[in-house]
Image: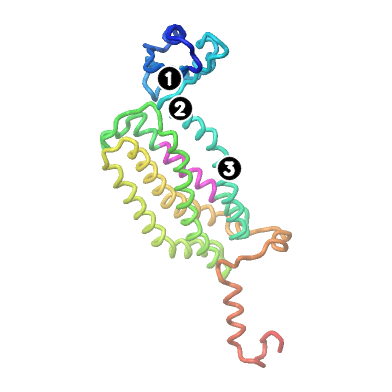
Amino acid sequence: MVANPVTSASDVAGITSRVSKVPGVISAKPVAFQNDTAVIQVIPTTGPNDSATTNLVNTMRGERTQLSGSPSVDLLVGGSTASNIDVSTKLTDALPIFLLVVVGLAFILLTFAFRTILVPITSILGFLLSIAAALGATVAVFQFGWGASLFGAAKSPVTLSYLPTILVAIIFGLSSDYEVFVVSRIKEEFTKQGNARRAVERGTGVSVRVVSAAALIMFTIFAAFTTLNLSAVKPIAVSFAVGVLVDAFLVRLTLIPAAMAIIRAKLWYHPQWFARYVPDPDIEGAELEKRLAERRVPAGTPGRPGT
């Protein structure tokens, strides 16, 4: 805690006395006083990660005028614990906006790429399921203590404040890759054959090796970090490892193909205005193959365009 400006040691003593009487404070003592600025060390009764400590910091900030004893004295609550609380609050407040931007961009890009609304919806729902599973596993292990001994971790009442943000970013990138691998192959088969269910079977069968290999590589990398003796790294490693496994094998290779097989050809429906105003990226290469086939037909051949 920093007080400025203070004119005498008695002013510092008065502030220290009032702060020490705040519920939740064990002790308060001045550690520095130079010119018109005093630094007061405040020790709470609870740990730095306890919610009661957060409430204490907020209470002291809300009562700064009463604690300072004078409107002219500016009382600031700082230090590592207060800074961590501020960072956690900022990240928590920004997470919904960040998630909305990620989901919104995914919806727009996938809708443009596959020219249908249902594919982006199923992809986003699967992505949210993977995030929920990863965070749930982290809470179960590091807060509830389920299997914590397997990772050499101790129970903690809180989760890393920045974990949800980086988890959303990493899992979104990986899930988008897996989605494009699988769905683009399915759409390619559907474009060629017109049989929606058969396209799901063939497309998923062709993609499973690529997606499985990529997911297992990332899982192995993340799982390896759980062996490090770093308490801040273990929750990140577990959440990433679980998120990759769930997203690749449960969502992209099981639930998404199952939903596509049930919906069948209706999955690829888009309104006429969409086809009229939105360009076709032709990611499956059907138009390119058609143009190449037309070029290979000799001039004057019956059925060739323009003859």
How many neighbours does mark 2 have within 10 angstroms: few (below 14), some (14-19), or many (20 or more)?
A: many
In the picture shown, does residue 225 fall above or below 298? above
Tell me the tag on residue 100: 3
- Which residue position is annotated with label 1? 53
Q: Main secondary structure of the magenta part?
A: helix
Q: Which range is magenta?
A: 123-136
How many neighbours does mark 1 have within 10 angstroms: few (below 14), some (14-19), or many (20 or more)?
A: many
Q: Is residue 181 visible?
A: yes
In the picture shown, does residue 160 fall above or below 73? below
* Label 1 to label 3: alpha-carbon separation: 31 Å
Q: Is residue 59 visible?
A: no
Mark closest to the chain's N terminus, 3 or 2: 2
Q: Give the residue type that dot 2 points to.
A: Ile
* In-image side of 273 versus 54 (left or right): right
Q: Is residue 27 magenta?
A: no
Q: Position of residue 49 (x, y in %)?
A: 39, 25
Tag 2's secondary structure?
A: helix
Quadrant for the C terminus in the image: bottom right
Q: Give the residue type that dot 3 points to.
A: Leu
Q: Nearer the viewer, residue 170 or 213?
A: 170
Tell me the tag on residue 85: 2
Mark 1 touches mark 2? (CB < 8 Å): yes
